[in-house]
Every structure is written in structure tokens, then in C-alpha cells.
Amino acid sequence: MGVLSGRSVVVTGAGRGLGRAYALHAAASGASVVVNDVDEAAAESVAARIREDGGSAVSAAGSVADADAATRIVDRCADEFGSVDGLVNNAGIFHQAQPWAEDPARIRAVVEVNVLGTVHCGLAAIARMRAQGGTGSIVNVTSGTHLGHPETAVYGATKGAVASLTYGWALDLLPLGIRVNAVSPLAVTDMKLPPYDGHAAPEEVAAVVTFLLSDRSEGVTGQVVRRARRGLGLMTHPDIGEMTEADRWEVEDIDGAFRDALGPLQPVGYGGHRAAPGPLR
């Protein structure tokens, strides 16, 4: 028996790439899977592949950016398989542009899918999991770009929102026994262009998602798991650094603090793309 035997899970954006790998791995691990994608044919193709391999799956086409559609996608899982035990919020739009070349319409689409889509599906799944007695696992998909990366400020901001959502939901749902984690894959997908140095194949990331959906990850919540070619780790949670106290904070006092107590400044970004601030003059 697989680690997800008897479980029913929804995987959004599962018609190709990472989502497809997550759905196939979950099914191979025993789960009944709802395969979602905006591309109905792609979703059905993955569901059919799971059934051909002896698994259980149905497709559910629709955009997670639509709250009603998101609810229908999650409800399909309960209607077909009797419960919603897991949700993988994978659906997303990758976006790359210089700040002066941004397109407002594209920005809105990215935010609506990456942020609102995660919220809509998550809320629908949480409602079902609460009604079932408070068990289940939600796995969100974030990105290291939220730490700062060239030409991905808007995309990174949406993934930073997903990370924050993960931390908040984990706290809210801890008393109910519902776990919420995220995965940050450095992986080869059709959303990214080469080079792929250090990138894992989608199939190499999928086991992390299955682990987080399973009872093997009992006690793990509010975490962001980073997966690269050979590496597995946890991303550091944001925190507030040590505070300097004074009786007043006028411009001159703040200037002095930056020159002394608050220095040196932290570098910006990750993955070799760091803006190293120079000394204050």
C-alpha cells in the first residue's frame, strides 16, 4: 500500500509540468486524484494516464482565479471520492519583465491566478476539511524568487504572498489538525527558459509533495521546503532583527543607527543575484 492509500487529493494546474508530476506521483502512491487545469484536454489526458496505470482519477477543468470554479474543483473531489484529504495549490503563471516594461493586464492575471487562485482553492478545501472533522494537508507552491530576483518582482511578490499565506494558515488551522506547508522547487518546467543549472526534474520534486500530503509529515506545518537538483532544505522564516532602542528617533538619530547599530546591511536577492549595498556615506 502506498503512503496516500485511501486519500483523495486535488492538484491544480496539473495538465503539464510540475503539476502533472505531482498528480502522477500522488496517484502512484495510492491517492485518488482530481486533476485540474484550464486546459480541459490536458487535464483529462493526465487523468486518463492515471487510470490506465491502475489508479483513480477524474479531471476538473477551470480557472482557479474564479472563486466559484475553484469551489467546484474542490467539491468534485468530495463528490467523486467522498472526501478532500489533500490540496496541492500548484496552478500559477510565471512572469518576467523589467519594471518599466510591465503590462497591467498581465500583472492582474498573474496576481489573480497565483494569489487569489491559491486563496480560493485553499478556502474551499479548508471548508471541506473542517466539515470532515479537521484533518487534511494543504501544499502550496511558492518560489525562491520571493527573496528577490532580477526581472521577477511581480511574480516573486505573488509567491511571497503564497509563503505568507502558508505561515498564517498553518497557525489558524493548527488547532484543527490541518497542516499547511509549501514547496519551493528549483525545477525544469515549460514556464522557464534555459539555463537549468541546479534544476531538478519535475519527477524529482514530486516526492516532496507526496510526503507533505501523507501522514509521514505529521507534525510538519508552516514550512517551506526547498528542492533543487541534489538538495533538500527548509527556507528560513522571515523574522525581525534585533531592535535598537532610544528615547527619540529623528533623522539624525536614524542616520547614526544605520551607520552603527544596524550595519552592515543585508544583501538583497538570492541565487547569485545579490545587490550588495555599499557603505553609507
Image (cartoon, helix red, strand yellow):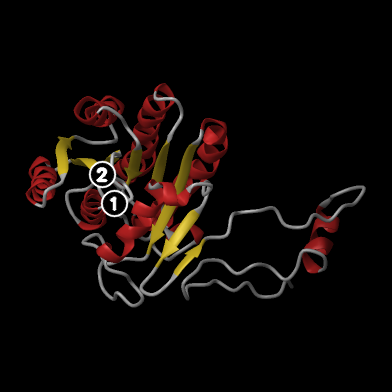
Nearer to the camera, 106 or 133? 133
User: The residue tagged with tag 1: helix, strand or loop?
Assistant: loop
Q: Left or right: 250 with respect to 198?
A: right
Nearer to the camera, 213 or 29? 29
Residue 205 in view of the camera? yes
User: The residue tagged with tag 2: helix, strand or loop?
Assistant: loop
Q: Amino acid at mark 2?
A: Ala
Q: Position of residue 130 (x, y in %)?
A: 44, 25
The single residue placed furthest to the top in the displayed view is 131
Q: Position of residue 138 (x, y in %)?
A: 40, 41
Q: Left or right: 152 with respect to 191?
A: right
Residue 159 in view of the camera? no
Q: Left or right: 275 with respect to 85?
A: right
Q: Position of residue 183 (x, y in %)?
A: 41, 55
The single residue placed furthest to the right in the displayed view is 247
Question: Which circle, 2 or 1, is nearer the viewer?
Answer: 1
Nearer to the camera, 135 or 201? 135
Q: Amino acid at mark 1?
A: Gly
Quadrant location of residue 264?
bottom right
User: Is the Cβ of the residue at disc 2 closer than 8 Å to that at disc 1?
Assistant: yes
187 shown above or below 49:
below
Which residue is labeled 1 in the image? 2
Q: Position of residue 41 (x, y in %)?
A: 7, 44
Residue at position x 51%, y 52% in the image: 223
Quadrant for the C terminus in the image: bottom right
Whichever of labels 2 and 1 marks the residue nearer the N terminus, that label is: 1
Residue at position x 31%, y 55% in the image: 95
Quadrant location of residue 171?
top right
Badge 2: how crowded within 10 Å, few (<14), some, or many (20+)?
many
Which residue is labeled 2 in the image? 31
Q: Left or right: 239 with respect to 16?
A: right
